[in-house]
Amino acid sequence: MRRYLIATHGSFAEGIKSSIELIIGKQENLSTICGYLTDDFDLDAAVRPHLKAMKEGDELVVMTDVSGGSINNLFMGYINHPGVHVITGLNFPLALGLLSSDENDRVEDIIADAIVAAKDGILYCNALKEQKKEDEDF
Amino acid sequence: MVVITRIDHRLLHGQVAFSWVQNIGADCILIADDDAAKDEIKKTALKLAKPQGVKLVIKSVEDSVTALVSGVTDQYKLFIVTGSVEAAKKLADGYAGIQQINLGGTVAREGTVNVAKAVYLYPEEIAALKELHDRSVEVECRILPGDRKTPFEAFAK
């Protein structure tokens, strides 16, 4: 079983989830952690149940907002936990690429593809019309 | 082979690009639209919506019919997107391989009837679709592939 967890400062995680679900529908295997919305937010306590729920062979693909932030720093401590995969630098194409992937594909492959999409998806649109890409044909 | 032909006034955009292409396993998208075919900025925007690994061809409706009839598209699992009932009818009239038409979204205009979520049709458009329906082309309304189909019989008598 492959599950996804988006963990960010503030409501970014819930926000991006709502955006994604508009495009590809409700995601049953996607959970979110919106960090630090209350003074007593305990990140470790929020994360632990997701790890506890993992059975042998399960995968948890985690997307965090930014490298160096406390959310990602915490998850760095779990990268050797069996089945846990952590990607930071969350953007819409990254989340979309991962969540619309095939569960039968290897996790390393879907992550690699999603990161390419995430990086290639950042475009300065004003500059696009200058580099007229060839039109495709059959 | 053409898997499905979708009528959506917004042509190719997030929802359509991802959910439909994935759902039908398309490896090629044909946007059959006269305006898009001659507008470079529209083309650029449409190319942005293209999912990775899927070919995207943008042609006028007439050129699309020519390409379909010529057989060059036979090797692809083709997802055709067009912007209006009129365009879809031209495609279906010109090429027998169009067997399923999905109504994904048309704009409300004065005189149109709201037949399903996001689908507004003139009586002439309903009549045109009826012609196709009578020729055993499946006509149905759905925004996303997982939605329940509203079949032609349900919205047109």
Image (tube, rainbow, N blue to C red):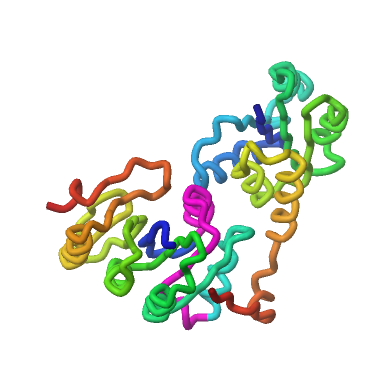
Segment colored magenta: B13-39
Q: Compared to B143, does B148 lie above or below?
A: above
Q: Compared to A2, does A19 lie above or below?
A: below
Q: Residue at x 36, y 55 (%)?
A: B104
Find out whether residue B31 is within the magenta segment.
Answer: yes
Q: Residue at x 40, y 79 (%)?
A: B66
Q: Residue at x 34, y 41 (%)?
A: B148
Q: Compared to A69, does B110 lie above or below?
A: below
Q: Nearer the viewer, residue A16 or B144?
A: B144
Apparent side of residue B64 relative to residue B117 in the rendered image (left or right): right
Residue A27 in percent (x, y) is at: 55, 35
User: Total label count?
Assistant: 0
Q: Nearer the viewer, residue B56 or B41?
A: B56
Examine the image and state in which quarter residue B100 appears.
bottom left
Q: Residue at x 72, y 29 (%)?
A: A59
Examine the image and state in which quarter residue B114 appears.
bottom left
Q: Compared to B119, does A15 lie above or below?
A: above
Examine the image and state in which quarter residue B121 appears.
bottom left
Apparent side of residue A29 relative to residue B144 in the rendered image (left or right): right
Find out whether residue B85 is within the magenta segment.
Answer: no
Apparent side of residue B9 relative to residue A136 in the rendered image (left or right): left
Q: Nearer the viewer, residue A38 or A129?
A: A129
